[in-house]
Image (tube, helix red, strand yellow):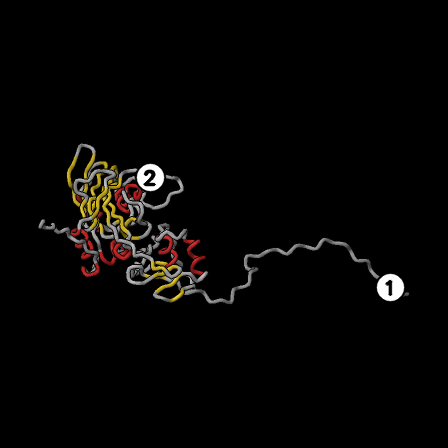
Amino acid sequence: MPRPTPRKKKYATPRKKKHATSKRPSSKRPSSKRPTKKSSVRRPIPKRRPTAPKPTAPSDGKQRLQKVLAAAGFGSRRECEELILAGRVEVDRKVVTEMGTKVDPQTQEVRFDGETLSKPKLVYYAVYKPDGVISTNSDPAGRPRVIDLLPNQDVRMFTVGRLDLHSEGLILLTNDGELANRLTHPRYEIEKLYLVQIAGHPERETLEQIRKGVYLSEGMMRVEGVRVKRKYKQSTFLEMRLNEGRNREIRRVLAKVGHKVQRLTRIAVGPIRLGKMTPGECRKLTHTELMSLRNAAGLSDKTAPRRHSKRATKKK
């Protein structure tokens, strides 16, 4: 008889015991480097020295053609652009229809419908800008402007540089684009002199730090000179000289060293002085002042406008 097949007994499978030596040895060779302890002190990340923006080349006195037409009273710049596209404008006896064309109204002949545009007379003013007056020519808020202080509004004028809203003092206005660009360009190093009233009394170390330079968002800001003019109980008057004026530079530099500006007055731009002018007053530059200003900007005296002297007529 065939043998009966034995039934498989149901037994729980025994769990394998984990041994301490159950892990296979690694095939990687042990590193020869010794483990270094991580220091809890973090090393400071070296900061990159900010570079100052590259100065732009000075303008050659040329302006866009539509700007010249607008200044002559032919309408807005947009309307003057349509006149150019219509072929109604000539430059040196040639019709110009290309937008963006630049001309020098002092040396080139510009015609509209065959008639020559009269060359604008160059005018130069010194103005004592009061506190609360803006330097820009247009303001949507309708605040008072520096150009509103001029007696003659027939000529299109613009400011040479700017002073912020709460700064006061000397500011020049003209329609001479070449001279204005040279006076504001850092290449010619036209010195501006300021009288600044600050809170407190700065130490010698603070003044030395201002002379060496203070880091701002644009980079290192330096002044050409700073000295204490006079002291009061709770404030000090400083005289500061700058060759390049940036947006609120003096206020930001002094705030960086812990002194708030209470009053800021510009008293000179190159050889032009504020003198005994009062806030809101304006005057024309004298011929001597204009010559010295042009010499400081590196312009030749031959191109300067001359003033005819009045000769006394003898009675016969």
Residue at image position (35%, 50%) is: 41
The residue at which mark 1 appears reads as 3
In front: 87, or 31?
87
* Mark 2, residue position: 144
Residue 256: x %, y % from top left = 28, 44
Q: Along the line of sight, which residue is nearer the eye, 230 or 4? A: 230
**Residue type of the residue flagged with mark 2:** Pro
The residue sitting at the front extreme is 316
Secondary structure under tag 2 reads loop
- Work out whether residue 59 or residue 258 is closer to the camera in this orientation and state it: 59
Residue 313 visible, this orientation? yes
Amino acid type at image mark 1: Arg
Q: Residues within 10 Å of mark 1 (few under 14, many from 20)?
A: few
**2 or 1: tag closer to the N-terminus:** 1
Q: CA distance from mark 2 to mark 1?
A: 121 Å
Q: Position of residue 211 (x, y in %)?
A: 20, 49
Q: Classify residue 173 as left or right of residue 143.
A: left
Q: Residue at x 32, y 62 (%)?
A: 109
Please give the count of numbered marks on the rendered protein.
Answer: 2
Q: Position of residue 6 (x, y in %)?
A: 82, 60
- Taking the view exactly as shown, the residue that stands out farthest to the top is 233
Task: Give the SS element for disc 1.
Answer: loop
Q: Which mark lies nearer to you, 2 or 1?
A: 2
